[in-house]
Amino acid sequence: MTILTTPRLRLEPCAQAHLDGLHAINADPEVMRYISGEPETREESQAMIDRVQARWARFGYSWFTFIERDGGAIVGAGCVQNLRREMTPDADPACPLELGWRLRRDRHGRGYASEAAFAMGDWAFDTFAPDELLAVCEPANTASSNVMRRLGMHDRGLQRWYGKDMATFGISADEWRLRAAARQAGAAR
């Protein structure tokens, strides 16, 4: 099982044991405002875990649960997954890899999304060697687009993903590696 760690978080593949924590996040209308526009039911959160586990088994990547290392609280979720042009439940391995995230509302503004996204991006580039990673969000979701900029991603304008026009950001493998080396050098000081 792939587990990633950051200074404050442990990222584990979404599992049945995470249902209560993930559902609490997905049922929050504010968290879901820019994702689906609607809070999820417990059954929808369960179906998401089932889909994610199948993708982990098939592709070796999908959604992680973000767990605080200090205390063990579930505080978010994030993914390395294939983008989809339309809103379908099935992943399309022909589409580029995407980084994505969502956080519990009381953890917004603490840098968790960036911290987790750096770890997921490092893992994706090291493990799967894509030429690039993309991230998308609703155009009004400035908090997510700010994370994308902190990751070093470049604004590619509006592109059609998940059946709607999404703000699309991307970064090449070479650019990511340069930024990763700079992050590591800064952390070593």
Image (cartoon, rainbow, N blue to C red):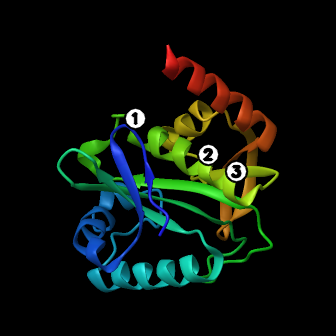
Residue 153 lies, in percent from the top left, at 68, 37
Q: Amino acid at mark 3?
A: Phe
- Which mark, residue 122? 2
Residue drawn at x 42%, y 42% as measured from the top left: 6
* Upstream in sequence: badge 1 or badge 2: 1
Q: Mark 3 and 2 residues: CB-CB less than 8 Å, in contact?
A: yes
Alpha carbon of mark 3 to alpha carbon of mark 1: how far?
Answer: 21 Å
Q: Is residue 67 left or right of residue 171?
A: left
- The residue tagged 3 is 125
Q: Amino acid at mark 2?
A: Asp
Q: Which quadrant would residue 169 be assigned to in this image?
A: top right
- Where 125 falls versus 79 (above or below)? above
- The residue tagged 1 is 111
- Mark 2: which secondary structure? helix
- Where 155 falls versus 96 (above or below)? above
Neighbourhood count class around disc 2 (C-alpha, 10 Å): few under 14, some 14–19, many 20 upward? some
Q: Nearer the viewer, residue 158 or 69?
A: 69
Q: Nearer the viewer, mark 3 or mark 1?
A: 3
Residue drawn at x 55%, y 76% as measured from the top left: 56
Residue drawn at x 64%, y 69% as measured from the top left: 162
Q: Nearer the viewer, residue 167 or 148?
A: 148
Q: Nearer the viewer, mark 1 or mark 2?
A: 2
Residue 13 visible here: yes
Alpha carbon of mark 3 to alpha carbon of mark 2: how far?
Answer: 5 Å
